[in-house]
């Protein structure tokens, strides 16, 4: 039994390699872990499997998972085993040896998850074995297969109710099919008509306004955002502990009441900030991501990110702390090239195995795609979580569509500067080449003799920085961690370089770059 959700957080991180729950997952995980009967309706791709896999690890004994798809079961078993979890499947696709090995693990009490094809339930042998095996939870994937009127009807699913009665354990049913009739049928057949705790929450939080802005003068940008929301409770998330302290000072100097919060503070100091935030009106907490799990304040009116979050999941979770009361709430997320570089190198330099690093890059790419989105943010965000068909009208891009221009030429110049210098330099040096600036470094390497030298004089330095940032946002170039962040072209850039694809860039981030103070380099 989990004492609290911090156990679940540790398992989420250490076993599954995710840094935060997807929308809706944590509530379901909590209910299932505590042994409630649960019906969860989540969109496809929303992350259902975690909602029974994680509770299975938290609960004693073995969890039986019933799923109609053999290939999917095998995938999940393989994934779990790679993560060090004792899992097995009994399906018609197994050899006798495989089946024997699974039975052995079950008898020895080592097995945590047993995947079962529904037709197995027809055998009285299976039922008997399960009764002796110490089953503590039944999870049913694709629970709508129990519906006789649906097109996915599986007659063997009708035996699941009987199994639940025989084992007398909680049952968690999952489906992406949300219509009321199917739900009713699931409740009748799987739960004997006793209403389970039901989760049917779309991911959309329509009262939260979404806004992103390229980072140019981050402190001023945050101060301006906060000034327009004086005396409202808000959170500013920062990438480092030091920044939480300096930024909270700056907010106080502007007449706000702000305090900072991070994992380096002693527990008493942290608790006192949590208590103040819960009870005081209009307090701003400037924090690292350490601030959040325990925060249950319904009337947080705004959340700002002074630095780009880790992933699209982390973004959703962090902005989701605003406006739980349903009243309008606002968010601002700043992003810059330095953030992208930092997040990439954190992934590359982490200890995660290669597949996981690949997935982490994917989740970061999704967030960058959202930051550089050309149309509605909410559609982009929810589309990623599998939810289509939403209306928005409550994001910066619905307020004012992004102005775009054909950036193909600029992107090709930038790519060619990188390729002609062996993909060995960061954006600063590449921009010097594009602008035709004869720095010592340029001269020392004879880069002033390259055909790309000086071909980019039509854009200013700040504008080129915005082009590079957008290129990283579209994953056309990536910093190589092993070579001090040298920019390397990705496969996605090849069609553009070959003239087979064009790319639109956002004009506003180029304009914002012009407002930038001259940079000390
Ligand atoms: P479905 O709801 O369609 O069964 P899955 O359980 O297969 O979805 O999950 C869909 C994808 O989401 C998988 O690639 C999974 O690794 C990923 N995923 C699930 N939970 C999280 C999380 N908390 N953070 C990041 N990725 C997640
Ligand atoms: Zn929108």
Image (cartoon, rainbow, N blue to C red):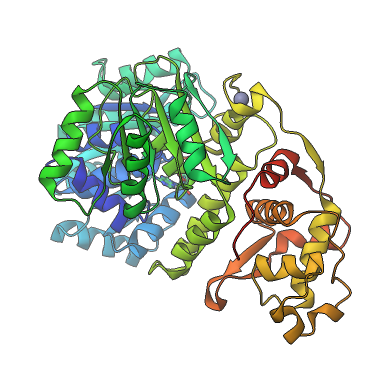
Residue 331 position, x and y percent, is 47, 30
Q: Is residue 134 left or right of residue 475?
A: left
In the image shown, does 104 or 271 lie closer to the viewer? 271
Q: Is residue 46 visible?
A: no
Image position of 233 (left or right of 164): right
Q: Residue at x 67, y 43 (%)?
A: 515
Q: Quadrant of the C terminus?
A: bottom right
**Quadrant of residue 120 in the image?**
top left
Left or right of 341? Residue 129 is left
Q: Residue at x 65, y 23 (%)?
A: 398
Taking depth in this image into account, of 8 and 343 the one nearest to the observer is: 343
Residue 392 x/y as whole percent: 59, 20
Quarter assignment of residue 249: top left
Q: Is residue 483 above or below residue 241?
A: below
Q: Ligand 2: which quarter? A: top right
Figure quadrant of the N terminus: top left
State whether residue 196 is above or below residue 238.
above
Q: Residue at x 19, y 47 (%)?
A: 7
Q: Is residue 458 above or below residue 127?
A: below
Provide residue 76's location: percent of width, then percent of height.
40, 53
| Of 8 and 140, the residue lying toward us | 8
Q: Is residue 108 visible?
A: yes
């Amino acid at each position: 039994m989990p004492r609290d959700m911090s156990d679940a957080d540790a398992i989420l991180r250490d076993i599954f390699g995710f840094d935060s729950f997807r929308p809706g997952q944590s509530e379901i995980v909590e209910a299932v872990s505590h042994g409630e009967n649960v019906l969860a309706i989540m969109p496809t791709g929303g992350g259902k499997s975690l909602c029974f896999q994680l509770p299975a690890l938290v609960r004693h004994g073995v969890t039986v998972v019933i799923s109609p798809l053999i290939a999917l079961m095998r995938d999940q078993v393989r994934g779990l085993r790679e993560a060090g979890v004792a899992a097995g499947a009994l399906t018609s696709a197994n050899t006798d040896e495989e089946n024997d090995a699974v039975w052995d693990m079950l008898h020895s009490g080592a097995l945590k998850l047993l995947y079962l094809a529904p037709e197995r339930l027809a055998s009285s042998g299976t039922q008997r074995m399960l009764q002796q095996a110490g089953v503590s939870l039944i999870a049913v994937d694709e629970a709508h297969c129990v519906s006789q009127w649906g097109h996915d009807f599986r007659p063997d699913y009708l035996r699941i109710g009987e199994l639940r009665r025989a084992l007398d354990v909680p049952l968690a049913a999952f489906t992406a099919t949300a219509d009321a009739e199917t739900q009713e049928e699931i409740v009748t057949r799987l739960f004997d008509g006793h209403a389970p705790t039901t989760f049917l929450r779309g991911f959309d939080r329509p009262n939260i306004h979404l806004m992103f802005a390229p980072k140019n003068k981050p402190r001023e940008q945050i101060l301006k955002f906060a000034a327009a929301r004086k005396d409202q409770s808000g959170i500013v998330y920062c990438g480092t502990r030091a920044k939480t302290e300096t930024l909270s000072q700056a907010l106080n100097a502007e007449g706000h009441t702000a305090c900072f919060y991070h994992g380096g503070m002693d527990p008493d100091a942290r608790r006192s900030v949590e208590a103040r935030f819960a009870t005081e009106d209009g307090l701003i907490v400037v924090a690292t991501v350490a601030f959040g799990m325990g925060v249950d304040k319904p009337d947080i009116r705004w959340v700002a990110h002074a630095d780009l979050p880790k992933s699209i999941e982390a973004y959703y979770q962090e902005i989701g702390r605003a406006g739980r009361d349903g009243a309008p709430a606002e968010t601002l997320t700043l992003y810059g090239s330095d953030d992208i570089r930092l997040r990439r190198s954190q992934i590359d330099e982490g200890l995660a195995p290669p597949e996981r690093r690949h997935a982490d890059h994917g989740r970061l790419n999704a967030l960058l795609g959202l930051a550089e989105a050309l149309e509605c943010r909410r559609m982009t965000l929810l589309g990623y979580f599998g939810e289509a068909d939403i209306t928005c009208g409550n994001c910066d891009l619905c307020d004012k569509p992004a102005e775009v221009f054909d950036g193909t030429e600029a992107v090709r110049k930038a790519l060619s500067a990188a390729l002609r210098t062996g993909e060995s330099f960061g954006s600063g040096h590449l921009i010097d080449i594009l602008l035709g600036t004869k720095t010592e470094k340029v001269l020392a390497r004879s880069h002033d003799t390259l055909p790309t030298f000086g071909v980019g004089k039509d854009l200013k330095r700040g504008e080129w920085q915005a082009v590079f940032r957008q290129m990283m946002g579209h994953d056309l170039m990536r910093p190589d961690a092993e070579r001090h962040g040298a920019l390397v072209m990705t496969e996605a850039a090849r069609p553009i370089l070959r003239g087979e694809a064009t790319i639109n860039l956002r004009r506003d981030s180029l304009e914002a770059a012009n407002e930038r103070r001259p940079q000390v380099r």
